[in-house]
Amino acid sequence: MLHASETWPIAVVDSARLVTADNAMVRWICKKKITDHARMSDMHRILGIKDLESTLRTGRLRWYGHLERQPNDMWPNAVRQMDVAGRASRGRPRKRWSDCVSADMSLLRLKQEDAQDRVKWRTAIRQSGSDERVQPSRLGTQRR
């Protein structure tokens, strides 16, 4: 479902569709219905997976760190820093991948220079979601 999502400039509508599909799959794996009122965070913890938004954020920032560590003359960086000549169309511009990365970096309080230290970058981007596991017997024991 998230194939090559590292390069998607994901819109709010697209994110909502992905989260809905992800939640349905997680409920199906855990054999829960919406009427069971089981929390999605509990089901994610039991399965040992992160929520969809933090997974997207981690992949996007992982790819960004890879690009930042490459030499500037490599073609992905040349394309990323390219300016297109001409006038912009009317209206608000479409959401760009760099806008998503900037929002992710400000959310995690990261700087562009942090990407040069691979270990620091990896630990910082992986802290955006929890990976702790819970025993499967606790699924659905807590009510809202």
Image (cartoon, rainbow, N blue to C red):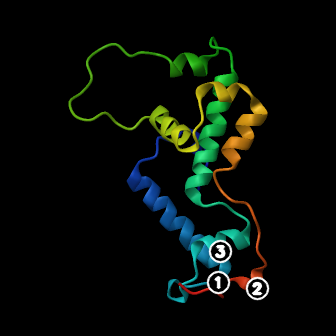
**Amino acid at dot 3:** Met
Tell me if mark 2 has few (under 14), some (14-19) or many (20+) residues whose alpha carbon lies within 10 angstroms of its own: few
Q: Which residue is mark 3?
A: 43
Using the rendered image of the protein, determine whether residue 86 is visible from the camera's viewpoint.
Answer: yes
| Mark in front: 3 vs 1 | 3
Residue at the image point whose x is 65% and y is 56% from the top: 129
Q: For residue 97, which numbered disc appears in the image?
A: none
Q: Secondary structure beneath disc 2?
A: helix
Name the foreground residue: 122 vs 20: 122
Mark 3 secondary-structure assignment:
helix
- Work out which quarter of the rendered image holds the N terminus and state it: bottom right
Q: Is residue 112 above or below residue 85?
A: below
Amino acid of disc 1: Lys
Tags 2 and 1 touching, CB below 8 Å: no
Give the class, few, some or many, for how many residues have Cα within 10 Å of label 3's Cα (few <14, many ≥20): many
As drawn, is 94 to the left or to the right of 117?
Answer: left
**Residue at mark 2 to residue at mark 3: CA–CA distance:** 11 Å
In the depicted structure, whether residue 136 falls above or below residue 77: below
Residue 31 circle label: 1
At horizontal 39% and vertical 38% (from top left) the residue drawn is 95
> Which label's residue is closer to the chain start, 2 or 1?
1
Give the image location of residue 13, x and y in percent.
38, 55
Q: Amino acid at mark 2?
A: Ser
Q: Which residue is mark 2?
A: 137
